């Protein structure tokens, strides 16, 4: 029997990026907020101090930062004809845990989506005709436009101190930035990061081929920065231990380095760590959330009543919790009915290797950062004419080598023995003169009728709750796109002067054991009417209006960029709607 | 190292006194008008400046100034008493004169002597008006019934009468007398620093009986496992390299362009100085900048081989945040270059920060509160000695070398501390 706790105005599930943003915004609005986090508290000096933060074995290989599969996992299959099996060690993606969530272990690649990405279905249909799209593709518009979201991208960038070079300032194209980006209201808060030799060489190669390279926008800061909340971040030291790691230098934007110092000072905020929410409670009408139930590490169960519930867990677990709580209708791929679990997507990443003459090139690959790099955007989204390429979508291409870590960065030319003295010699010969980028092509994955999330019929967690089941595979559209982009990347490697290239376009089937990215999206998507989505344009549940669902689970499909910039912008967008509209008149913000 | 009586004060009314005279005693004593809003406001401000809460509020108790906080002194432990208006267990039954005597003469209601953990040696500088304003404010607090057994000292210190002799030797009662040769601002700063703010309670060296060494005022003192640094205008160890604005920023926010507060000063910042007016902080800064430093003494040049090793350790372990030139980053990583904490003759604080790490203070205006990680687990005594000697003698810094045995003792002493 759950112990019923005193009422709170707001219960937030998960204290990562979106939970921290919402908690800060809603406490600013005067509400009494509790955030309930499954994992532990973490802070820089205690949990990843400079004296051991750069431990590749501990963090990269042994997954120190991540959710333990014994606490919660997922099951996976490629299609409905297979029986899904549980993931017993993370492979294709890494799922965060604890305060800060994935915002602790990300690379901090800080992108905005394209204006056309938010109106994708309309845009593509208008330009190419409805019949141009594969029949099983289920892409749709987001229900918001560029003008809606731009101020919130800006807010998130200024929270984080994002380093970059503007490409389109108030409609005017800027030299050195991304000319394809949507019009931005302000420059980046800090200048672009300094680029290494390999990154700069990529820019030269790209320019030779007529492209317009620009520095990757970065949440690892080029200089010290104090954000509007008064929190100071440090300058990146280019140590190259970002993704999979916590930053020991206070220079990677994370909830810890941008929001939590202010949030924790507030008397109307409370965080409860090591507490796992097991369901969102709804009243007998099914139309109103009454709070959440959670379990602490002793196994004691608590009911936390709240007027407003904000679901801020990782995308997969948002969807799992909605399904377990009976909120909305579970998606059925046979009939296409139902919305919870629909339009599940990942990312289509591909890359390769460029081997250079060791006597002429020394890239010092260990001088790096999670979001260092030079990129081109000529082949992203609908920045180019797709009429004759046989697919839709695209991605950015870049020399975005984030590290030279000794266990991972052991690429050797094809034909080298896998061990022994010849392997060692080849490694020695090539370590400093190889461009090694696994995700050089960071491309979209659009949504399809048969890629979806559902509750697993067999495998359960320690409480007897079904695990979330991933049914996903790559479709021809994405495979063609990946080959197209990877070929373009190879052309640039050659223009840079590579003596040998090895490229790996993404192949089917989707492999859950090999790392791709941790960008899992969809399943509780936003849209312009309850017939096509779980959430309205403000991320408010169509079914339960006092429930808002943050995060990439709201993406109707994924664009050719890393998602966190958009996740943060959507959180600010939703928080603004709650503050300016919902609190004055609680109820549906969009009437169907 | 020994601490002075400061660690935390205590007023001492005796619990043996027991019951009380009556709630109305104070009201009849004169000098306090319950309707005088301005007096209550001024009293609140002075209570903040005097940092009453540091000792008289038990953190986490939820009861302001109701006592119960243990105060560590080199002579044993005292428990701070209840100074809420509760007539039985607080000071509700005290007359105003009794209250004035406690603060300015160090005597309890029954005429016995307070222990100087209660800084009456400083509060004696307060004007009667200011003391009564504090009383007026205390009268407005909720009365909390909380009996406190103040005296936990071992024999012979528990004999309160011994304090009469102590007062005779070390206590000069008397209100603050302005220095006509100095500016009004200087005198305001002097009044605050030497009176209610009682800076010297931590920052002035003490003799073997815990009394201030009068000839070494504000030149730094080891207590609570830290070294409260020299806050005279000494060029290296004191505030010589800080401007008036640097001092104000530090006292207001806990951080300035080069330094960050940590340790016991964090609490002083949060409870006291960050709430003080900019004018008063500036006055304190003006006064402190006018205090002469220690006699100049050039420390012996450190061993060259050790400096080389120290420099290598610095590059590996420290320069990522504090940067190669030791300047760090404003508001985040303190500058070691020119740092007074780094150059104190007594390296207690420096060793503590390196060995155990330290969380800097977070304040409303500087909420970041960055922390230094602990290095005790990764550097041995020789290595710590080398690296701290290096930073004490690089970039123009100069301070005595630190030996491995000093590090070993600091390590052992920290292992015994729970704070």
Image (spheres, coloured by chain):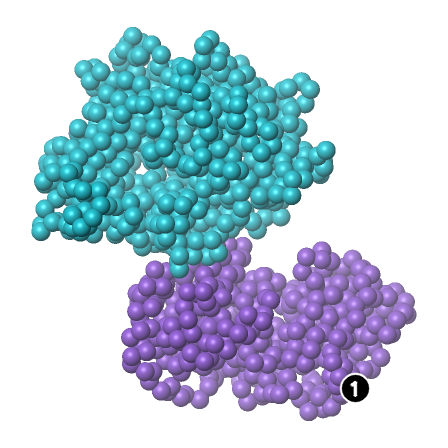
A383 above or below B20?
above
Horizontal side of residue B141 vs A574, given as left or right: right
Residue B97 makes an appearance in the image: no
B418 versus A380 height, above or below: below
The residue to which callout 1 is attached is: B161
Q: Colour of chain A?
A: cyan
- Specify the quadrant that holds the C terminus of chain B: bottom right
Tell me: residue B6, above or below residue A432. Answer: below
Q: Position of residue A209 (x, y in %)?
A: 11, 33
Q: Position of residue A332 (x, y in %)?
A: 48, 13
Q: Residues within 10 Å of mark 1 (few under 14, many from 20)?
A: few
Residue B410 vs residue A72, the one in the foreground = A72
- Work out whether residue A36 or residue A299 is closer to the camera in this orientation and state it: A299
The reply to whether residue A386 is in sight is yes
Q: Residue at x 36, y 64 (%)?
A: B318
| Residue, far front | A420
Q: Eyeballing the image, is B13 above or below B66?
A: below
The color chain B is rendered in: purple
Q: Is residue A67 left or right of residue B150?
A: left
Position in image of residue A462 (x %, y %): 58, 34
The residue at the point 34 percent across, 28 percent down is A511
Task: Give the quarter of the image for residue A151.
Answer: top left
Depth check: give the residue in front, B135 or A158.
A158
Chain of the residue where label 1 is placed in the rendered structure: B
The residue at the point 59 percent across, 81 percent down is: B2
Give the quadrant of residue B27.
bottom right
Horizontal and vertical percent position of residue B71: 68, 72
Q: Secondary structure at mark 1?
A: loop
């Amino acid at each position: 029997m759950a112990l019923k706790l005193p009422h709170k105005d707001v219960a937030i599930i998960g204290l990562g990026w979106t939970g921290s943003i919402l908690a800060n915004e809603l406490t600013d609005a005067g509400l009494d907020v509790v955030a309930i986090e499954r994992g532990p508290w973490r802070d820089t000096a205690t949990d990843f101090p400079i004296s051991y933060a750069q431990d590749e074995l501990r963090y990269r290989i042994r997954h120190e930062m991540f959710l333990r599969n014994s606490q919660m996992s997922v099951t996976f299959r490629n299609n409905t004809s297979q029986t899904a099996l549980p993931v017993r060690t993370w492979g294709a993606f890494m799922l965060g845990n604890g305060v800060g969530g994935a915002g602790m272990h990300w690379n901090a690649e800080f992108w905005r989506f394209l204006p056309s990405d938010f109106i994708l279905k309309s845009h593509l249909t208008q330009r190419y005709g409805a019949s141009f799209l594969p029949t099983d593709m289920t892409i749709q518009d987001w229900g918001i436009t560029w003008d809606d979201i731009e101020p919130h991208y800006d807010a998130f960038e200024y929270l984080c101190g994002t380093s970059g070079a503007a490409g389109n300032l108030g409609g005017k194209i800027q030299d050195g930035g991304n000319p394809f980006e949507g019009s931005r209201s302000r420059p980046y808060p800090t200048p672009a990061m300094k680029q290494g030799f390999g990154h700069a060489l990529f820019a030269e190669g790209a320019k030779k081929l007529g492209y317009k390279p620009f520095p990757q926008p970065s949440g690892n800061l080029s200089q010290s920065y104090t954000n509007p909340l008064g929190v100071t971040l440090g300058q990146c030291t280019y140590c190259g231990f970002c993704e999979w790691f916590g930053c020991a230098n206070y220079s990677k934007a994370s909830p810890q380095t941008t929001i939590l110092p202010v949030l924790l000072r507030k008397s109307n905020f409370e965080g409860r760590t090591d507490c796992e929410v097991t369901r969102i409670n709804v009243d007998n009408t099914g139309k109103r959330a009454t709070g959440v139930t959670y379990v602490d590490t002793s196994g004691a169960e608590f009911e936390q009543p709240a007027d407003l519930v904000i679901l801020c867990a990782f995308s997969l677990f948002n969807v799992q919790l909605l399904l377990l709580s009976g909120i909305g209708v579970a998606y059925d791929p046979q009939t296409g009915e139902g919305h919870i679990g629909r339009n599940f997507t990942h990312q289509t990443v591909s890359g390769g290797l460029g081997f250079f003459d060791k006597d002429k090139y020394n890239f010092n690959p260990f001088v790096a950062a999670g979001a260092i790099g030079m990129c081109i955007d000529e082949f992203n989204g609908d920045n180019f004419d797709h009429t004759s390429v046989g697919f839709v979508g695209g991605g950015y291409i870049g020399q975005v080598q984030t590290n030279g870590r000794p266990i991972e960065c052991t690429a050797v030319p094809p034909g080298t023995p896998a061990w022994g003295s010849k392997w060692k010699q080849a490694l020695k010969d090539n370590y400093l003169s190889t461009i090694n980028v696994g995700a050089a092509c960071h491309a979209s994955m659009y949504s399809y009728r048969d890629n979806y999330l559902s509750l697993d019929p067999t495998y359960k967690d320690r409480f007897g709750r079904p695990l979330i089941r991933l049914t996903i595979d790559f479709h021809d559209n994405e495979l063609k796109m990946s080959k197209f982009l990877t070929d373009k990347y190879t052309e640039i490697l050659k223009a840079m002067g590579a003596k040998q290239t090895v490229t790996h376009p993404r192949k089917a089937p989707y492999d859950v054991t090999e790392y791709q990215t941790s960008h899992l999206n969809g399943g509780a998507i936003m849209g312009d009417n309850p017939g096509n989505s779980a959430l309205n344009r403000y991320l408010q549940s169509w079914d339960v209006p006092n429930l808002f669902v943050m995060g990439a689970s709201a993406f109707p499909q994924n664009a050719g960029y890393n998602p966190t910039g958009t996740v943060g912008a959507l959180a600010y967008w939703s928080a603004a709607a709650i503050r300016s509209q919902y609190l004055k008149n609680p109820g549906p913000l969009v009437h169907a | 190292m020994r601490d002075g009586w400061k660690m935390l004060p205590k007023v001492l009314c005796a619990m043996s006194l027991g019951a009380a005279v009556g709630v109305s005693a104070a009201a009849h004593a004169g000098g306090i008008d319950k309707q005088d809003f301005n007096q209550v406001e001024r009293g609140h401000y002075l209570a903040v400046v005097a940092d009453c809460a540091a000792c008289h509020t038990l953190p986490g108790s939820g009861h302001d100034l109701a006592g119960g906080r243990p105060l560590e002194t080199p002579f044993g432990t005292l428990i701070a008493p209840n100074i809420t208006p509760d007539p039985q267990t607080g000071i509700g039954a005290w007359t105003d004169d009794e209250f004035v005597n406690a603060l300015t003469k160090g005597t309890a209601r029954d005429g016995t002597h307070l222990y100087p953990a209660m800084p009456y040696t400083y509060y004696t500088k307060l004007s009667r008006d200011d003391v009564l304003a504090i009383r007026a404010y205390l009268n407005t607090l909720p009365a909390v019934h909380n009996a406190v057994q103040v005296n936990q000292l071992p024999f012979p210190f528990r004999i309160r009468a011994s304090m009469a002799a102590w007062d005779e030797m070390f206590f000069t009662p008397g209100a603050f007398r302005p220095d006509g040769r100095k500016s009004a601002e200087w005198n305001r700063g002097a009044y605050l620093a030497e009176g209610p703010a009682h800076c010297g309670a931590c920052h002035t060296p003490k003799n073997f009986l815990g009394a201030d060494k009068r000839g070494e005022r504000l030149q730094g003192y080891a207590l609570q496992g830290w070294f409260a640094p020299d806050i005279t205008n000494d060029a290296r160890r004191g505030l010589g390299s800080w401007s008036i604005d640097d001092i104000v920023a530090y006292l207001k926010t806990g951080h300035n362009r080069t330094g960050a507060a940590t340790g016991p000063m964090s609490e002083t910042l949060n409870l006291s100085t960050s709430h003080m007016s900019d004018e008063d902080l500036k006055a304190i800064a003006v006064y402190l900048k006018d205090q002469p430093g220690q006699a100049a003494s050039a420390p012996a040049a450190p061993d060259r081989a050790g400096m080389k090793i120290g420099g290598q350790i610095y590059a590996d372990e420290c320069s990522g945040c504090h940067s190669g030139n030791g300047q760090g980053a404003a508001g985040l990583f303190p500058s070691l270059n020119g740092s007074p904490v780094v150059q104190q003759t007594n390296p207690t604080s420096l060793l503590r920060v390196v060995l155990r790490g330290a969380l800097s203070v977070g304040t409303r205006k500087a909420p970041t509160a960055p922390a230094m990680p602990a290095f005790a687990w990764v550097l041995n005594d020789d290595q710590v000695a080398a690296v701290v000697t290096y930073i004490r003698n690089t970039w123009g810094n100069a301070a005595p070398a630190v030996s491995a045995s000093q590090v070993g003792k600091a390590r052992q002493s920290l292992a015994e501390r729970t704070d």
